[in-house]
Image: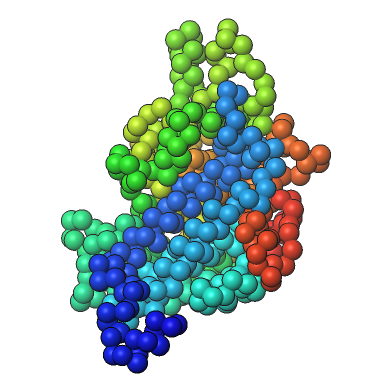
Amino acid sequence: MVVAGLSAATGCSKFLDINANPNVPEKAANNLILPSTQAGIGMLVGNSMLIPGSFYAQYWTQNTTSSQYKTTDQYLLSSNDFDRMWGIMYNNVLTDLDVLTKQTTNSQYAAIGYIEKGYVYQLITDAFGDVPLKEAIAGTANTNPKYDTQKEVYDSIITWVKKGISIADPSYPTLPLTEDLVFYNATKKVSDMAQWKRFGNTLLLKVYLRLSEVDPAKAQAGIQELYAGGAEFLTTDAVIKYTSTGGNQNPLYSESTGLKAVQNIVASSTAVNAFKANNDPRALYFYTPNDSLLKSTGQNVAVGIPQGSYATTIPAKDKDKLPSTPTAALGGLASDVSSATAPVKLISATESYFLQAEAVARGWATGDVATLFQNGVKASFTASGLASSAAAYLATAPDAQLPADKEGQIKAIITQKYYALCGTEGFEAWTEWRRTGYPNILTVSKATALGTLDLPARFLYPNSEVTRNLNFPGAKLITDRVWWDVK
């Protein structure tokens, strides 16, 4: 303040302005901000939320020979475990998205910003319930933002995504946005805004279906409005791709290298046994085969261990019981450098088809539920490199048969979605289980420290909020349900 006063009095402000560095601009350019938001989202979906989500969905469990995620299997995660995730969401991604949504020179940055903002807030509120929204990005001086109800957050999500869709324009004159990590079309050298509109529509469909049990009237009205407006949905995966270069690697693999490439994550028998019961060839896309069984019996199969059984010692003579690991295609094989290039899926084509199928099954949308259901399965098999095996699976797998009644159809749709999202969209699979109760195969971890038969129903608020935010509404238990989880 003294320096500022002296500079004003002497007219030497340019010489005394020690805060102005001509080599470091005070305002970042949009072409730097956009990929930063997407990289942050990739970290959330492909690491911070994927790992606990995939443990709670019982795709993965802790290896018997390591210890990194024991507390996850015990349902003993603490508030400290969520500080990093919360920081990425609020301090990084949402702060940058606030800049993009205020962009007026190129409205397509704003379009993507609004859609991404809705996507990120759905992740936040589905994980934590009530969260700061109205006061969350109201300036860096606001360190005590008030919490908004999950219902209010959902209303805002719908508003933002609709706005983003409304201003997304594939013919915008200043395209391309070459820095778009999700929908840049390298052939046409443009950011594919038509795909962003489809992404937004698919996100809205997911948002409305999330309300199916708590506010079905609103869910139905929203979905019918989407279809009446001729909404198009994703038919290809919305992904972020990675390279083998350090700093640009798949975030799950990057964490494993930071842990000295120790293989902590292995297959849970909950998911593996379900794949086996359906003779599902995708199991060997999601999990590595057990080498001992392959050599001794010729069986090329995945092996899982019961959820939370990391304290069990597997004798050296029982190599055929050693658990499989996630494959490099998922970024989960710590010893394989090709894990570095595994993509992170934000919304997959298979998820899009299953969302549409459920909307039709509930009578809230037009279309053929059987065709959409089959398309969802086929999209998953295609993504797994098994397109030619989809027809046989649909004809014979017990869980691939679509009943005639509504509830039976919903169960089949969510169960197939569960199989399809294995290892790539674990948080979404666990969230859909919380909403619907399907698939009804989850078991209580053998390592549970809860003393009950309860399963995790939410993430815990971070310690940074507990200790610093004067408007923090109070801690929650890991078994406390979020607003829409009423079933």
Q: Residue at x 62, y 43 (%)?
A: 56
Q: Give the x, y percent position of residue 133.
A: 57, 72
Q: Position of residue 300 (x, y in %)?
A: 45, 19
Q: Nearer the viewer, residue 251 or 145?
A: 145
Q: Is residue 298 above or below residue 304?
A: above
Q: Residue at x 76, y 38 (%)?
A: 449
- Camera-side residue of 429 and 126: 126
Q: Residue at x 67, y 27 (%)?
A: 309
Could you tell me if residue 340 is visible in this image? yes
In the image: residue 244, left or right of residue 37? left
Nearer to us in this view, 165 or 216: 165
Residue at (25% x, 67% y) in the render = 23
Whether 166 is drawn above or below 431: the answer is: below
Where is residue 67, by image quadrant? Answer: top right
Residue 291, horizontal then vertical, whole percent: 46, 16
Quarter of the image that includes the C terminus: bottom right
Q: Taking the image as drawn, is residue 412 in sight?
A: no
- Quarter occupied by the N terminus: bottom left
- Give residue 320's position: percent from left, percent from top: 55, 14
Left or right: 234 with respect to 54? left
- View extreme (right): residue: 451
Position of residue 155 in the picture relative to residue 373 (left or right): right
